[in-house]
Amino acid sequence: MDRRITNLIITGFSGTGKSLVAKEIARGLNWDFLDTDDEIVKQTGKPIAEIFRQDGEGKFRELERETIRKACQQRQTVIAIGGGAIVDPQNYELLAKTGLIVCLEAKPETIYERLFREAVYSPETEVRPLLANDNPLERIRQLKASRQPYYANVDWTVHTDNLNISQVAEEVIRVSRLLRRYAPRNDREKARSSIDKDVACVVETATQSYPVFVGYGLLDKLGEKMKQAALSGTATMISDENVFSLYGSKVEGILKDAGFAVNSFVVPPGEETKNIDYAIKIYDFLVEHRAERDDIIIALGGGMVGDLAGFVAATFLRGMPWIQVSTSLVAMVDASIGGKVGVNHPEGKNLIGAFYQPNLVLADCQTLTTLPQRELTSGWAEVIKHGVILDEEFVQFLESNVNRLTKLESELLTRAIARSAAIKAQVVSQDEKEREGKRTILNYGHTIAHGLEAATQYKRFLHGEAVAIGMMGAAKLSQRLGLLPSAAVERQQALLQKLGLPTGFSGLGLTEITRAMELDKKTKEKAIRWVLLQDIGKAVIRSDVPQQEVLAVLRELV
Ligand SMILES: NC(=O)c1ccc[n+]([C@@H]2O[C@H](COP(=O)([O-])OP(=O)(O)OC[C@H]3O[C@@H](n4cnc5c(N)ncnc54)[C@H](O)[C@@H]3O)[C@@H](O)[C@H]2O)c1
Ligand SMILES: [Zn+2]
């Protein structure tokens, strides 16, 4: 389809805040705003509900089609369209030709709440007549399900459940900028083609805005993606021996084919390498090869390589462009997103570091086929964490597909990683430097996990294993405080176990753990900020958790 994108179209079910969001975006972009429902009301002098009642839905759809046809002749306009409009193929074609279509999504329960309980989201009248029904929640579910295939055809979807109007508007603006930027535009034909489907999400912070590409077999497109991101020059690839022996020469070849000169520096695998001595070795290598400020650092590997290479990129020549090519599950869904880079100090992990965002992140899920099983399993803990704190629908997706995910089925694996990465991206975009507390919810399960890791000198548990146990602790704690029903605790436990993660531990004294958690030292002013659950998909932060409850939970975990 030929596309000349001049408008931004906002669609989605009623109660997702389309109209308010579109207005806010228009203000932000300094564009015009148009709401097709409002236009119809203006034109007919009747409220939508009355048109439905007096003239029937058919008449309304006719008016809607005509209004959309006119709206599509605008330029630089943010157009909010009724939730049922894109079901019509004629409307869809017209809209897609002239605008980038963003769908606002929300769970049926959220929609119900917003339409019937809250005044914040003024409910569009369009859906009211359809909902004049005994069981509105069920009707929303059905109607939404029937529209889902059409909503799936849009360029981008924003989940609005945990966002307010201006946050949704910000997200749409950021995404629309990026989609336009990454739309291929070197020649006319390409300029009209649609947007880059490999973008799983966009991280936008004060210092950098960058795409996270997720796909199966995506390594082949690395050179192309780098050129699209306007990177050029010499690439210094940093990798560890394991990863380099598997993928090093392949990636070197891909980069050379794309016109980059490549030098590779390979370090030993393992957390012990993530220290300042190895950073210095890499500085020496860069000096020796006369690296310049516009050259590129590429981290090819897991989180260890990413943190180390990113730290070098942040500091050498006061900062060089860098990209992360993640090869472990932990790196794909967690470490590569958010720009925390650094090295360990003998006295503590990650004590030396910076916030330094990459220029792009690329995850080829196919590389997970060579990742050792225990590393893979450990990575699932962070994936589950992302669902459990923010996205119940994603938890459902994981639950229904556990078997196929553990078999690394390409399509489902890609979807799971893309969604998980997107959740992390959304959180860090709102709170890059962990100043506003929003990023804190990512610490779900980590308070106890750190205790377990430190008490065992970081030798016994992989990080994800400790996080899985910590998540069980946090869930049980939430239950004890009356926040979470026991069924939800069991649900989390079942999912963790199905993915092969531990949910308890043995052979470790409680005092060692509490000492490592510094529970004994915490005073009221320095109380631990616990990330707890109110429901699956809904995290809360509490600083008033009594110590005896924590101890009781630790005992339960043994
Ligand atoms: N920056 C952040 O926000 C952040 C977040 C989480 C974790 N981290 C850091 O990430 C590190 C943990 O990450 P990790 O679990 O990826 O560890 P890692 O990088 O050490 O990788 C784990 C092991 O898997 C191997 N490996 C990686 N990809 C492979 C592949 N495709 N095939 C075969 N082997 C492969 C590695 O060689 C290594 O032996 C820690 O240093 C942690 O502090 C950082
Ligand atoms: Zn973690």
Image: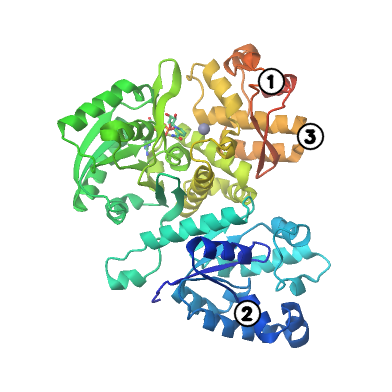
- Say which residue label 3 marks: 482
Q: Is the N terminus in the top left, top right, bottom left or bottom right quadrant?
A: bottom left
Q: Quadrant of residue 340?
A: top left
Specify which label sits upstream in the sequence, 3 or 2: 2
Marks 1 and 3: in contact by CB < 8 Å? no
- Say which residue label 1 marks: 524
Asked which secondary structure carries label 3, the reply is loop
1, 62: nearer the viewer: 62
- Locate residue 372, reporting x and y percent: 42, 34
**Residue at x 56%, y 64% (from the top left corner):** 103
- Say which residue label 2 marks: 39
- Locate residue 288, reporting x and y percent: 15, 30
Q: Is the C terminus in the top left, top right, bottom left or bottom right quadrant?
A: top right
**Identity, as a three-letter code, of the amino acid under mark 3:** Gly
**Identity, as a three-letter code, of the amino acid under mark 2:** Glu
Asked which secondary structure carries label 1, the reply is loop
Front tag of 3 and 2:
2
- Locate residue 357, reporting x and y percent: 39, 41
